[in-house]
Amino acid sequence: MQGIQKLNTLPKGEFVEELLTVCGCRGWVETMSALAPFSSTHGLHAAANQEWWRLSKEGWLEAFGAHPRIGDKAALAAKFSATQPPAQEAEEQSGAAVSIIPLACTAAL
């Protein structure tokens, strides 16, 4: 089971935790949780976009505040440590600039 199917089968608490890795605004996450399950990845994207633009300024600031500051690689690595490649793979890529993308972004969105 992958992607949208996996997301749809998560218990509510785990669903919320997954979405919090994508957006730190609890209001957005709670709304998305209430809209679940999603019939398709496209449906999830459409709802995520629609609900993002419905947020208040405070909601946006909460979301932005949950992310590490630009350039703070240590904070970024700590936040997304569960998505880090295995040590051997990390060594092989040590000279490359690798983006750390949370699994929830790739699997759910």
Image (tube, rainbow, N blue to C red):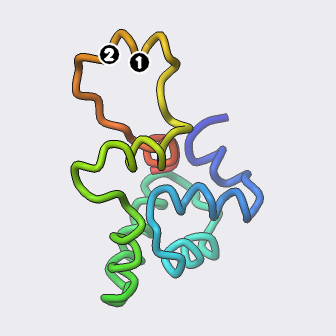
**Left or right of 95 in this view: 8:** right
Place of residue 73 in the rendered image (x, y in percent of width and height, measured from the top left): 31, 43
Name the residue rendered at 48%, 60% in the picture.
44
Residue 38 vs residue 28, the one in the foreground = 28
Place of residue 38 in the rendered image (x, y in percent of width and height, measured from the top left): 58, 60
Q: Residues within 10 Å of mark 1 (few under 14, many from 20)?
A: few
The quarter of the picture where residue 64 lies is: bottom left
Amino acid at pointer 2: Gln
Residue 62 vs residue 76, the one in the foreground = 76
Place of residue 51 in the rendered image (x, y in percent of width and height, measured from the top left): 42, 77
Residue highlighted by disc 2: 93
Name the residue rendered at 56%, 78% in the picture.
31
Where 34 sits versus 104, above or below? Answer: below
The quarter of the picture where residue 55 lies is: bottom left
Q: Are marks 1 and 2 in contact (CB under 8 Å)?
A: yes
Residue 8 vs residue 27, the one in the foreground = 27
SS label for mark 2: loop
Residue 64 vs residue 105, the one in the foreground = 64
**Left or right of 12 in this view: 55:** left
Label annotation for residue 90: 1
**Left or right of 66 in this view: 71:** left
Amino acid at pointer 1: Ala
Where 105 sits versus 47, above or below? Answer: above
Place of residue 95 in the rendered image (x, y in percent of width and height, measured from the top left): 23, 17
Q: Residues within 10 Å of mark 2 (few under 14, many from 20)?
A: few
SS label for mark 1: helix
